[in-house]
Image (spheres, rainbow, N blue to C red):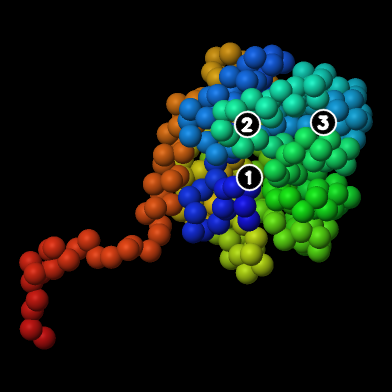
Amino acid sequence: MIIDGHPIGASHPPFVIAEMSANHNGDLDRAIKLIDAAVEAGADAVKLQAYDPVHLAVARGGIDKKLDKGPWAGWTLGDLYQQAHTPRAWFPVLFEHAERAGITIFSSVFSEEEVDFLNQLGAPAFKISSFDFGNLPLISRAARTFKPLLMSTGMATDADIRAAQIAAANLNENIAYLHCVSAYPTPIEEANLRRVEAFVERFSRHGWATGFSDHTLGNDTAIGAVALGACIIEKHLTLSRSDGGLDAEFSCEPDELKALVTSVRNVWKACQEPSGSVEDAHRDLRVVRAA
């Protein structure tokens, strides 16, 4: 798989995605600053979310449906998505800015209409969120672009994964499955990183990539995921958690993202086959005892 010139796979350093999500806080200038922060941190890509807030709220259960658990408890879906969404008019501006800044930009899509819109905009890849992993028409529409397709598997059963494989892989082989836990934030003891290892074994035989969309606090789980074979890491980014916002609680700050990029690339290097023996200089100092 290649995303915008970046080769993705076990023989390449992890592809690190900075997820903007709602952390623009409704401010286009802040969204642009988040792109710049991702560049400065050394991320490979920044990801947006493309949806119509009314249509998404209706699809999820209704505009007036009130959430009673999690970080958005007390919000109605209509109010939540209205505040969190990235206006469509921003997308050309953000894509142009990312191109000038030298970073890949793409988006999660939540309807077939958004697939078409972003395809016309020149998006180099598409992401399916865990909440849409069962939306097979959406997966098929994104797969028919023949562009790389990343799919988060939070809440998915094995049957869901098999259905998504059929919906996507029959049309497009450029697929990555991202393990994630759809809890915000995810308690570290619930991260279930062994699923990354299982995904690598399961999907690599088809030539598909395995990644990790991380909602835990800190960088430990993402680093561990790379050690287990993840070749894509996605992490939410905010300019500062103290600024507040819908996703701030489980997002990393720019210096934390920079540390993550360095760590996962170092761990990837440590997992490669060595080019030679660095121990040769000391080999003659070994004590060898006769049998």
For residue 119, say whether it is visible. Answer: yes
Residue 231, how many percent across, how many down? 54, 52
The image quadrant of residue 264 is top left
Amino acid at the residue labelled 1: Asp
User: On screen, 261 above or below 170?
Assistant: above
Decide: few, some or many residues near mark 2? Use Cα within 10 Å; few <14, some 14-19, many ≥20. few
Where does label 1 land, which residue?
4
Instruction: Let me know if residue 202 appears in the view.
Output: no
Residue flagged by tag 3: what amino acid is it?
A: Tyr
Q: Is residue 66 left or right of residue 209?
A: right
Q: Which residue is mark 3?
A: 51
* Front-most of residues 69 and 16: 16
Q: Which residue is mark 2?
A: 99
Label 1 vs 2, first from the N-terminus: 1
Q: Give me the residue at 66% from left, 53% from top.
A: 176
Nearer the observer: mark 3 or 2; the answer is 2
Depth check, front residue: 250 or 2: 2
Residue sitting at x 56%, y 33%: 102
State the CA–CA distance, disc 3 to disc 2. Answer: 22 Å
Q: Is residue 99 left or right of residue 259?
A: right
Please provide percent x and percent y for residue 285: 7, 66
Which residue occupies 37% across, 54% down? 270
